[in-house]
Image (cartoon, rainbow, N blue to C red):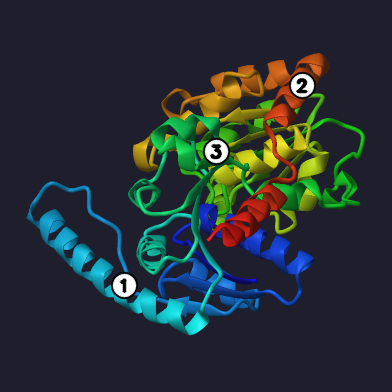
Amino acid sequence: MRLMVSGGGTGGHIYPALALIDDLVAKDPTAKVCYVGTHRGLESKIVPARGIPFETIKLQGFSRKLNWHGLTTNIETVNLFLRGVHDARKIIKDFQPDVVVGTGGYVSSAVLYAASRMHIPTLIHEQNSVVGVTNKFLSHFVDQIAIAFEDARSQFPDKKVIFTGNPRAQQVAQMHSDFQWDSYGLQNDVPTLLIFGGSQGALKINAVSEQAIPKFNDRHYQVVFVTGQKRYDDVMAQMKKDDITPAANVVVKPYISNMPEVLPRVAAIVGRAGATSLAEITALGIPSILIPSPYVTNDHQTKNARSLVNVGAAEMITEDSLTVDHLMSVVDQLMKDDDKRQQMAVAAKKMGVPDAADQLLAAVIKLTHQK
């Protein structure tokens, strides 16, 4: 098979694409893959580093500002889109894909639109419960739409929609881990809470978690507080200023590079409600306390979080109501109640799709046989 994939801007669009590619290559080592992104996006660093052939086109997203600058930006965006479609057609002609898959981000708009006009089988994957602008546009042109949240179904033409889950989930679910907490200086047999605001860290989560350390210090459970690489020094400086020292049951780390190996050992997690994170924690059945980012388009993280809250798989704290007392109240209630954690774990796992990459790949292969 010759597979072309396009998606970028954030890890939430890139990692599902890479999971699909990994699954294809594992099953068919003769498969050829081409990834199309932008030269400025995160994909330009991640994809080539994986040894995957990478092509670029120049595109930008629409401005939501209703002023003169927004208008001129959007005129330029339209012009770049038209030029991007032209460039995408050339890349497609050169590579001759059997199928083209888009995983979101504005770069996929030109690639998938061009492929659909060239009558090449096309599929888009929507990771969130609220559909992104690019996928909403592409839904009118592509052959099939794969979703990771059932809540997204009603936002697309129904006859095109299939549910596959997020392929990133399969990579985590299949991970065989020998990780033990003693490598962090913790005890292996004590329930451990992970606080993780994302790879870049989250200011409010970090600030409240730092202030909560004195309370965590005397709890019966353990805490691993991950600040994000670029915010670690700020958190450590603030701890010094506040004269806060973690006890033996609390560890503060900048980043966890082997997160898929660590997650199966986590008793509960406090974090954002991005699509990739939720795919991972539901695949593993991890109880969660979700603090949706208020800074994302269409508040989609809140909608993602509610999907888990509604089935009893998660608790939710809004960022504007996040305080030390509120956090400690929810965390303590969860960490001291083994039965509740078990019930939430079962509910989370029911939502998970541990074979999501296989399901998405099967849909892609089926599509190539239909045209």
According to the picture, the residue beneath numbered tag 3 turns out to be 272
Q: Please give the label number shown on residue 232.
A: none
Q: Nearer the viewer, residue 31 or 294?
A: 31
Q: Which x, y percent locates residue 255?
A: 66, 55
Q: Are marks 2 and 3 in contact (CB under 8 Å)?
A: no
The residue lying at 71 percent from left, 59 percent from top is: 257
Q: Please give the label number shown on residue 341.
A: 2
Q: Which x, y percent locates residue 22?
A: 70, 64
What is the distance, in whole Å, between disc 2 and disc 3 at their CAs?
19 Å
* Element class at badge 3: loop
- Please give left or right for residue 9 compared with residue 163 in the image: left
Instruction: Say if residue 126 shows up in the picture.
Output: no
Residue 91, compared with residue 124, is above or below; it is below
Give the residue type at disc 1. Gly
Q: Please report whichever mark, 2 or 3, sits nearer to the chain's N-terminal start.
A: 3
Q: Please rate how many residues cluster around mark 1, counting C-alpha atoms within 10 Å: few if below 14, some from 14 to 19, many from 20.
A: many
Give the residue type at disc 3. Arg
State which mark lies toward you, 1 or 2.
1
Q: Please rate how many residues cluster around mark 2, counting C-alpha atoms within 10 Å: few if below 14, some from 14 to 19, many from 20.
A: many
Q: Please report whichever mark, 3 or 1, sits nearer to the chain's N-terminal start.
A: 1
* Element class at badge 2: helix
Give the residue type at disc 2. Arg
Q: Nearer the viewer, residue 92 or 107?
A: 92
According to the picture, the residue beneath numbered tag 1 turns out to be 84
Q: Please report whichever mark, 1 or 2, sits nearer to the chain's N-terminal start.
A: 1
Q: Quadrant location of residue 188?
A: top right
- Please give left or right for residue 43 compared with residue 83 in the image: right
What is the distance, in whole Å, between disc 3 and disc 1 at their CAs?
33 Å
